[in-house]
């Protein structure tokens, strides 16, 4: 489990044969879970100044692999007793989104991101979403996209400063939204966003 708060921007040393090797200040152990651009991966090798994680065929099919170069978002899994911030992130990427529009909004920047329509039902106004491992709040939801407002601190300390229109990103929708939708999917005609927000507020 993760929080969506990036520990650091790790440097990609190599990526071949499904093995991704990263240089990082953080020193994991063999078998540790590390979220890399939001995907939970297992550490399989440790070197002096780097560590390696392995991607399964399933991971390579679902992830925006073009972003696994130069720098990547890295967050180690939470440990028992850690302070909980951000939101609950599983490291299970649902789909790839595409940045459709970037607008300056006062001292912040609005990013409009499209995603496959079958996943938009899990995106809730003012709910949480994870973009390449970064925990963020959804401002608006449209038929096949949503809007995020990113503050300068987040842009400067994440890959958001490099994203452009057309950039693809890993998306993990909110875990509670997925669970609640599936719990009530047979009664979804009677379930409004207000109902969903009230249910989620009880957790």
Image: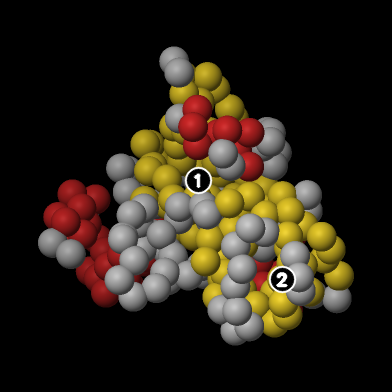
Other residues around mark 1 within 10 Å, as few (<14) / some (14–19) / many (≥20): some
Could you say where residue 118 lies in the image, as x and y percent from the top left? Answer: 49, 60
Residue bearing mark 2: 51
| Rendered-image quadrant of the C terminus | bottom left
- Of residues 13 and 16, which is closer to you in this image? 13
Q: Is residue 131 visible?
A: yes
Could you say where residue 87 lies in the image, as x and y percent from the top left? Answer: 35, 57
Q: Is residue 118 above or below residue 146?
A: below
Q: Is residue 149 above or below residue 53?
A: above
Locate residue 39 relative to residue 124 in the image: left or right: right
Query: Exactly how many numbered labels are in the figure?
Result: 2
Residue bearing mark 1: 144
Image point (21%, 59%), residue name: 200
Could you say where residue 91 lies in the image, as x and y percent from the top left? Answer: 51, 67
- Of residues 46 and 121, which is closer to you in this image? 46
Residue sticking out furthest to the top: 106
Disc 1 from disc 2: Cα separation: 38 Å
Locate residue 51 relative to residue 145 in the image: left or right: right
Image point (73%, 60%), residue name: 23
Locate residue 154 relative to residue 138 in the image: left or right: right
Q: Secondary structure at mark 2?
A: strand
Contact flag, marks 1 and 2 (Cβ < 8 Å): no
Locate residue 193 relative to residue 139 in the image: left or right: left
| Rendered-image quadrant of the N terminus | bottom left
Q: Secondary structure at mark 1?
A: loop
> Where is residue 30, by image quadrant?
bottom right
- Of residues 131 and 179, which is closer to you in this image? 131
First-in-chain label (1 vs 2): 2
Q: Is residue 181 visible?
A: no
Disc 1 vs disc 2: which is toward the camera? 2
């Amino acid at each position: 489990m993760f929080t969506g708060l990036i520990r650091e921007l790790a440097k990609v040393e190599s990526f071949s044969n499904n093995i991704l090797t990263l240089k990082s200040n953080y020193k994991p152990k063999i078998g540790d879970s590390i979220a890399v651009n939001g995907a939970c991966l297992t550490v399989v090798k440790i070197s002096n100044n780097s560590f390696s994680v392995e991607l399964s065929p399933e991971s390579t099919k679902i992830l925006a692999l073009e972003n696994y170069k130069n720098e990547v978002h890295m967050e180690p899994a939470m440990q028992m007793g850690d302070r909980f911030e951000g939101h609950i992130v599983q490291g299970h990427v649902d789909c790839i989104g595409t940045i459709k529009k970037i607008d300056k909004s006062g001292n912040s920047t609005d990013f409009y991101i499209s995603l496959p329509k079958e996943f938009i039902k899990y995106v809730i106004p003012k709910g949480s979403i994870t973009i390449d491992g970064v925990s963020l709040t959804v401002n608006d939801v449209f038929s096949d996209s949503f809007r995020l407002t990113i503050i300068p601190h987040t842009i400067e300390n994440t890959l958001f400063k490099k994203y452009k229109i057309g950039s693809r990103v890993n998306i993990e929708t909110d875990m509670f939204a997925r669970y609640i939708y599936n719990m009530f999917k047979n009664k979804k005609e009677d379930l409004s966003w207000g109902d969903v927000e009230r249910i989620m507020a009880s957790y």
